[in-house]
């Protein structure tokens, strides 16, 4: 059986649409320690950043199967934001907290380094 694609981008797009359709404010929680995350570092707290991705807050929002990209303002300064989907921990509505927390992707789980086998010679 071939490897199936991740459900994360499909669920994220669906929840984003649901939140916006209900005139609520979609927020993302992003793990900024993941590779490829481009956000203004001065707004990162404890390795996380919360991003408002409502249509009024961002320009050029693109959610594809690998990343979220948009232009946004932080403290009046424009920034280009790039978030690989593996760095998205949750999407939720600011007003009521409804949304989804995502489990780490299988390749994103911290695994211990493989150890060399220990062999003993038996006579």
Image: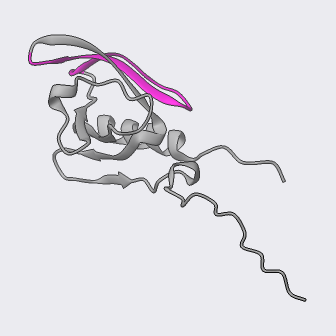
Residue found at the far right of this picture? 123
Which sits in the foreground, 81 or 65? Answer: 81
Q: Is residue 92 magenta?
A: no
**Image quadrant in which the C terminus is located:** bottom right
In this picture, which residue range is highlighted in magenta? 56-75
Q: Residue at x 27, y 37 (%)?
A: 26
Residue 20 in percent (x, y) is at: 30, 34
Confirm whether residue 66 shows in the render: yes
Q: Magenta residues: mostly which secondary structure?
A: strand
Q: Residue at x 44, y 28 (%)?
A: 36
Q: Quadrant of residue 69?
A: top left
Residue 47 in percent (x, y) is at: 26, 42
The scheme the figure's colours follow is: one colour
Q: Residue at x 83, y 81 (%)?
A: 121
Q: Quadrant of residue 23?
A: top left
Confirm whether residue 23 shows in the render: no
As drawn, 64 above or below 117: above
Q: Is residue 73 magenta?
A: yes
Q: Is residue 56 left or right of residue 64?
A: left
Residue 19 in percent (x, y) is at: 31, 41
Q: Is residue 56 left or right of residue 8?
A: left
Residue 114 in percent (x, y) is at: 63, 60
**Image quadrant in which the N terminus is located:** bottom right
Q: Residue at x 39, y 36 (%)?
A: 17
Q: Is residue 117 left or right of residue 78?
A: right
As drawn, 36 above or below 25: above
């Amino acid at each position: 059986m071939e490897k199936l694609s991740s459900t994360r981008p499909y669920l994220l797009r669906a929840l984003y649409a649901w939140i916006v359709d209900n005139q609520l404010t979609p927020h993302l929680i992003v793990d900024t320690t993941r590779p490829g995350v481009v956000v203004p570092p001065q707004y990162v707290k404890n390795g996380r950043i919360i991003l408002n991705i409502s249509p009024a807050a961002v320009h050029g929002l693109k959610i594809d199967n690998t990343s979220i990209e948009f232009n946004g303002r932080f403290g009046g300064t424009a920034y280009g934001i790039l978030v690989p989907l593996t760095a998205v921990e949750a999407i939720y509505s600011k007003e009521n907290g409804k949304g989804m927390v995502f489990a780490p992707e299988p390749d994103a789980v911290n695994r211990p380094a493989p150890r060399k086998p220990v062999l003993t010679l038996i006579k």
